[in-house]
């Protein structure tokens, strides 16, 4: 049996609008469940799975779970009504069992570690690392992938990172609740480090460094080695990424003739001149600054703080807001703001999605602000894809090795000790379970 015959399954928590899910899907993973609390993002996931041809497997076998990940119970429990996954039973032949899942992935909320926030880390109520660790213990997947902002690599979070690593692979660390140093047995994984990957190194026209942790179960890894992906080429500029869509946005007005067409031509040529010049002259190759999605607690959508807006200005784009699409712009008479402003055109949600590396056929639900937040908070699909492929390479190689040497894949799980179980209970308590 070769890699093409070996189906890799995944579960993703904090799935958002599907950035990581798209990338892992492209890497060959089949999703058993996508868990998300935001209703607009849930609707986005369901709609794309429903209509896109390439997602027919998920249409039949995946549960899109709407709700708090703290309440997510992927394995059935007799005393917990509604626990377990439903659609995956048709593929698995029954309920999901511990140790059978290939990959547990999640882009846990970044505010606890973001430079743009207060960096409360483990003291932030939005910290979902305890819940992720509890799910790792419950599911015992063959591999784990966790994505977060670069800020989690800061020195102030070193003890917390060490604790997470110790919980996964064993070692000495300070327990966050008490600050007391302890020896942890671990959950049977080898942590393949926290790597900071820059999105612009992988074809995304944006400076978006993300910290990614990969851990692979020791019995799966064996003599194999996980290799982090290397940059795939030079940066893709905003000019190259958006030129076609900008032409499309101005085209209806160019076709009108007269003063409107002249105005549209001036604005389009001005944008092309500034964006192409940035692509040639800027050290970063004219890529975008980091998109920020914001939160429901803050105002409408824009392209970030003052520094980000200044960077967008150099690319010929106004960062003061997000543009309506053509139909909505005509209805609201907003094109003077959206397309013809002195600061340059504002980006539409669709163009922001291009900057994040979403495929053209992926659509978003909800109002403009809700859609932009889904886009701005996403993990760029191309980055998720290259990490997913690196993980898939190990899992396929392990499957072939174990099939060849044992006659069938290894199903044995590391024996848990009492300290490991106690650690798991602590994780559940911190996660509010």
Image (tube, rainbow, N blue to C red):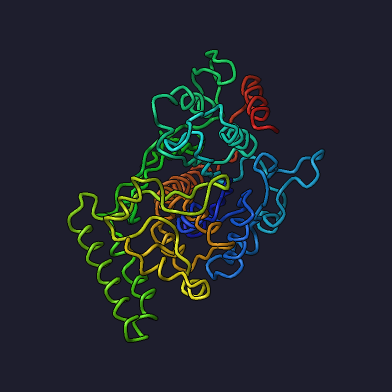
Q: Looking at the image, is 217 positioned above or below residue 268? A: above
Residue 370 falls in which quadrant of the image?
bottom right
Q: Looking at the image, is 36 positioned above or below residue 273? A: above
Residue occupying image coordinates x 46% and y 52%: 376
Residue 301 picture location, percent across and down: 48, 54
Residue occupying image coordinates x 55% and y 21%: 176
Relative to the observer, which residue lies in front, 393 or 313? 313
Residue occupying image coordinates x 39% and y 25%: 155
Residue 330 picture location, percent across and down: 49, 75
Relative to the observer, which residue lies in front, 254 or 176? 254
So how many labels did they put on this image?
0
Residue 167 is at least partly visible in this image: yes
Residue 77 falls in which quadrant of the image?
top right
Residue 423 picture location, percent across and down: 62, 23
Q: Residue furthest top?
A: 180
Residue 201 is at least partly visible in this image: no
Q: State left or right for residue 228 relative to residue 66.
A: left
Residue 104 falls in which quadrant of the image?
top right
Residue 78 picture location, percent across and down: 81, 40
Q: Looking at the image, is 371 positioned above or below residue 192? A: below
Image quadrant where one finds the C terminus: top right
Q: Residue furthest left?
A: 281
């Amino acid at each position: 049996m070769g890699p093409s015959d070996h189906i890799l399954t995944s579960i993703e928590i904090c799935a958002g609008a599907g950035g990581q899910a798209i990338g892992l899907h492209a890497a060959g993973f089949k999703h058993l469940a996508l868990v998300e609390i935001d209703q607009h993002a849930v609707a986005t996931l369901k709609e794309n799975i429903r209509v896109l041809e390439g997602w027919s497997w998920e249409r039949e076998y995946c549960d899109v779970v709407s709700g708090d990940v703290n309440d997510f119970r992927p394995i059935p429990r007799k005393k917990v009504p509604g626990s377990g996954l439903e659609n995956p039973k048709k593929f698995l032949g029954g309920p999901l069992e511990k140790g059978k899942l290939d990959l547990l992935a999640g882009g846990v909320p970044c505010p606890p570690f973001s430079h743009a926030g207060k960096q409360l880390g483990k003291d932030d109520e939005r910290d979902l690392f305890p819940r992720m660790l509890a799910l790792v213990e419950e599911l015992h997947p063959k591999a784990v992938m966790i994505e977060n902002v670069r800020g989690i690599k800061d020195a102030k979070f070193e003890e917390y990172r060490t604790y997470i690593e110790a919980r996964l692979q064993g070692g000495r660390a300070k327990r966050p609740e008490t600050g007391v140093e302890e020896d942890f047995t671990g959950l049977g994984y080898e942590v393949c480090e926290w790597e900071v990957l820059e999105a612009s190194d992988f074809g995304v026209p944006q400076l978006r460094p993300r910290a990614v942790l990969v851990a692979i179960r020791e019995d799966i890894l064996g003599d194999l080695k996980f290799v982090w992906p290397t940059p795939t080429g030079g940066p893709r500029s905003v000019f190259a990424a958006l030129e076609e869509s900008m032409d499309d946005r101005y085209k209806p007005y160019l076709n009108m003739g007269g003063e409107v067409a002249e105005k549209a031509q001036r604005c389009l040529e001005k944008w092309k001149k500034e964006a192409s010049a940035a692509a040639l002259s800027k050290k970063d190759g004219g890529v975008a600054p980091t998109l920020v999605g914001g939160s429901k607690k803050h105002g409408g959508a824009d392209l970030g703080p003052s520094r980000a807006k200044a960077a967008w200005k150099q690319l010929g784009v106004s960062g003061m807001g997000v543009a309506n699409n053509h139909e909505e712009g005509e209805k609201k008479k907003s094109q003077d703001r959206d397309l013809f402003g002195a600061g340059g055109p504002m980006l539409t949600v669709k163009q922001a999605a291009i900057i994040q590396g979403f495929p053209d056929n992926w659509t978003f639900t909800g109002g403009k602000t809700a859609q932009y937040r889904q886009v701005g908070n996403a993990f760029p699909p191309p980055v998720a894809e290259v990490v997913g492929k690196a993980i898939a390479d190990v899992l396929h190689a392990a499957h072939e090795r174990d099939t060849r040497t044992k006659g069938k894949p290894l199903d044995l799980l590391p024996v848990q000790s009492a300290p490991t179980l106690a650690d798991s209970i602590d994780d559940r308590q911190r996660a509010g379970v």
